Amino acid sequence: MNQSEILIIGSNGQLGKALQAKYPDARAVDSDGLDITDKQAVDAFDWSGTKIVINAAAYTSVDGAETPEGRLSAWRVNAEAVGNLTHPVWRNNIRLVHISTDYVFDGTQEEHNESEDLSPLSVYGASKAAGDLLASQVDSHYILRTSWVIGKGKNFVQTMLGLGEKGINPSVVSDQIGRLTFTSELVKAIDHLLTTKAPFGTYNVTNSGDSASWADITREIFKIAGYENSVTDTSTEEYYRGKEGVAPRPLQSTLSLDKIGSTGFISTDWKTGLKNYIEEEK
C-alpha cells in the first residue's frame, strides 16, 4: 500500500492526528484544505493519484447537536458531506474508509452487531446514521463503527486524570456500559482492513475486554495513575437532572467484535490500552 495514495480528511481531529502518525506520507487535509460540506469544492478537488480516502471528519458534540445551530452543523458534516464525497470516490474507483459510532443504536441491546437495525436516539446519532447509509452506497467501502474514542487532546480520560490530580472525588455515570476505543486501536484496525484487503462492509471496532461503566473506567484510571480518589456511582438520569439541551444517550454501547475478529484482527484489551495511554501522557 503506497501511503502517497491515501487521503486523510479531518486531519486535525484525534483520529486524524493518529492516522498522520501512521501514514506520514499520506495527503492530509482539514476543513481549510478541503471543505467537504461544499459540494463544488469536493467536485473541484484534485483526486488524481488517490486510491484510498479515510474520512475522519465529524461533528461530534452530542449535546451541541441538539441546539438549532448544532443541528445544522451535525447534518451538514456527518451526512451531507458524506454524500458529497461519494460521487468523486465512486467516479475515481477510490476505496472509502468512514468512521461511525454506537450512537446509531438506541442502546437497548446488550451487545450490538453489524446487522442491527439503525435506531438513533439523538440528532448526532441520526446524522451519523444517515452518513453510514450514504457511505454504504459506495461499493468499495469500510465503515468502522466504534465507541468511546480516546486520543490526543481533550477527552474523558484526560478529564478524570485532571480531577484525580486535584484530589476531587467525582460522581460518574454507572448505567452506561461499553468499552473504550483508543485511536491507536482504530488506526490498527483501518490498516488491517486495508492491507489484508478484507471484504468490504461495516465492521465494529473497539478495544476488547469486559464491558464497563464510565464509573468503573474512572476507578481503573485512578488505579493506574496511582490516585486514591473515590468514585460515586450515579445514573444518567440523576447526572443530567435539571440540565437543559442534553441529548439522550444509549445505555448499552458494547459492540460485538466477532466480525473483524474473523478477518484475523486481534483487539487489544481496553485496560491494556488505558495503561499504555496513561503512561504515555504522564
Image (cartoon, rainbow, N blue to C red):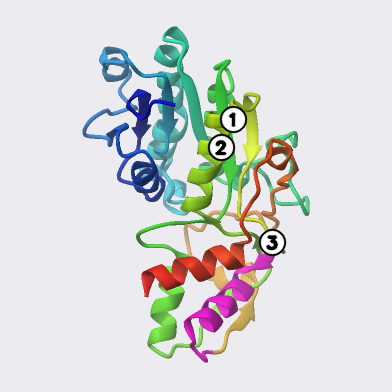
| Helix, strand or loop under label 1 | helix
Kind of residue indicated by mark 3: Gly
Q: How many marks?
A: 3
**Which quarter of the image is occupied by the C terminus?**
bottom left
Q: Which residue is mark 2?
A: 192
Identify the residue under disc 1. 196
Q: Position of residue 55 (x, y in %)?
A: 42, 33
- Segment colored magenta: 211-229
Report if residue 42 is visible in the image.
Answer: yes
Whether 70 is drawn above or below 167: the answer is above
Marks 1 and 3 sit apart, C-alpha to C-alpha, by 24 Å
Tell me which label, 1 or 3, sits earlier in the chain.
1
Q: Amino acid at mark 2?
A: His
The extreme top residue here reads 91
Instruction: Indicate whether 251 appears above or below 88.
Output: below
Please report the residue visible at 60 percent of the width from the left and 55 percent of the height from the top. Answer: 249
> Which dot, 1 or 3, sits closer to the camera?
1
Residue 163 percent coordinates (x, y):
42, 81
- Residue sitting farthest toward the left: 32
Residue plotted at (53% across, 67% down): 274
User: Disc 2 on helix, strand or loop?
Assistant: helix
- The first of marks 2 and 3 along the sequence is 2
Residue linked to disc 3? 209
Is 212 part of what is drawn in magenta? yes
Residues under labels 2 and 3: Cα distance?
Answer: 20 Å
User: Are circles 2 and 1 on residues that touch, CB within 8 Å?
Assistant: yes
Q: Choose between 126 and 110: the one closer to the eye.
A: 110
